[in-house]
Amino acid sequence: MAKINKKLKIGFFTDTYKPQINGVVSSVEAFRLELEKQGHQVYVYCPKIKNKKSSKKIIRFRSVKFFFQPEYYISLPFSRKTIEYLWQNDLDIVHAHTPFSLGQLGYYYSVIKKVPFIHTYHTLYPEYVKTYIMKGKVLTPQMVKKLSAVFSNRCDLTIAPSEKIKKLLRSYGAENTIKVLPTGLDLEECKPIINNNFRKKYGLHEKDKVLIYVGRVAKEKNIDFLIKAMADLKKVNNNIKLIIVGDGPYIENLKTLTKKLNLQKAIIFTGYFRKDQVIKAYQASDLFVFASKTDTQGMVILEALACGLPVVAVKDLAFINMVRQGFNGFLVRENKKEFATKVLKILDDKKLYHKMIANALKIAQEFSIDKITRQLITYYNQLIK
């Protein structure tokens, strides 16, 4: 059994990592960087993608594209050389960010080496299979719930990014220790940008009220709802615009819907942005809008708050601690009229709007990556002890 060290050797096992872009990658990278900043060593075991080579601390396994969703990869952890390197590296703790191939490898390493095994449940897999794997008719949501519980019960600790995920895991049958710990945010990345040219670049005028969505453009993100709500908002205020930042498999469907509703001049699709460009987009906007009900914690909501944006989102337990009713935004039912009413309430009431900006910044401070990572290290040390 590993002894408690002031500085730990931590293994992150994940089936998605750079250069891929998604919430799991953002979480893994945020924690990796902060753990190393605080003096610990982090080794990432991940798929080999687009000729990305292994390094001393980023160990890549041969992988193949996932048949049902080619933007994702399945790792094949059968390389003798890579396995030998893993077994020679005496980790103090294994932290899996996937229950699949590399998560399984991490689990067996922890058993053989007798070190603690932690898993963060990042993705709502029962919802995922309904959307991407033959509409959940072969591998059913109920089967996935059971498998999620079985894997969780193997762990010394499961981390849920939100209270929503903890409750769901319990309902699936997970009986092990579950702690709620969201991914923190590097608040320095969100500091005000001087000479932000985003509005000028996209032809937005000073009088325009800009709503922004940031994230993967996929069907489960429910962006259709935001576009349909825009049709109602435009009838009241013709200066309202919607910026959709991101890319994904559903983007052409959304462009078709935008054209159908005659909203081409009101909705701007920017495509994928680097992080610094995303921050510019947030800070050039007036309000963040979100309609997904499949997120595990809503990291983009936290980013928006850190950039001083009030939020209007479809109500979901995943971010109920981030968006506090009437304080820094509103959580509403999936109802276009109710959604539009709350958007207009914030935009039309200057006193309320500026109060919500201040409160948004205040809430973001509670989720700093420094603070959240220190809590994670506490969990690590408790398990090692």
Image (tube, rainbow, N blue to C red):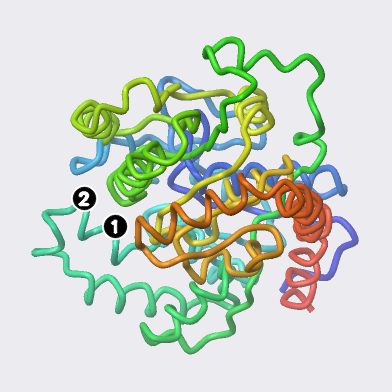
Q: Quadrant of residue 192?
A: top right
Q: Quadrant of residue 265?
A: top left
Distance from Cα at disc 2 to Cα at disc 1: 6 Å
- Residue to which mark 2 is pinned: 132
Q: Are marks 2 and 1 in contact (CB under 8 Å)?
A: yes
Q: Quadrant of residue 321?
A: bottom right
Q: In the image, what residue occupies the spot 38% across and 34% down?
A: 62
Q: Which amino acid does label 2 sit on?
A: Tyr
Q: In the image, what residue occupies the spot 76% across and 34% down?
A: 189
Secondary structure of the residue carrying numbered label 1: helix
Could one spot residue 284 in this view of the protein? yes
Find residue 114 and name its label: none
Q: How crowded is mark 2: few (under 14 residues within 10 Å), some or many (20 or more)?
A: few
* 6 in relation to 157, above or below: above
- Residue to which mark 1 is pinned: 128
Rendered location of residue 128, percent (x, y) = 29, 57
Rendered location of residue 283, percent (x, y) = 69, 31
Q: In the image, what residue occupies the spot 44% across and 84% down?
A: 174
The quadrant of the picture occupied by the C terminus is bottom right
Q: What residue type is labelled 1?
A: Tyr
Q: Is residue 60 left or right of residue 260?
A: right
Identify which residue, 258 or 237, lies in the foreground: 237
Q: Residues within 10 Å of mark 1 (few under 14, many from 20)?
A: some
Rendered location of residue 39, percent (x, y) = 87, 47
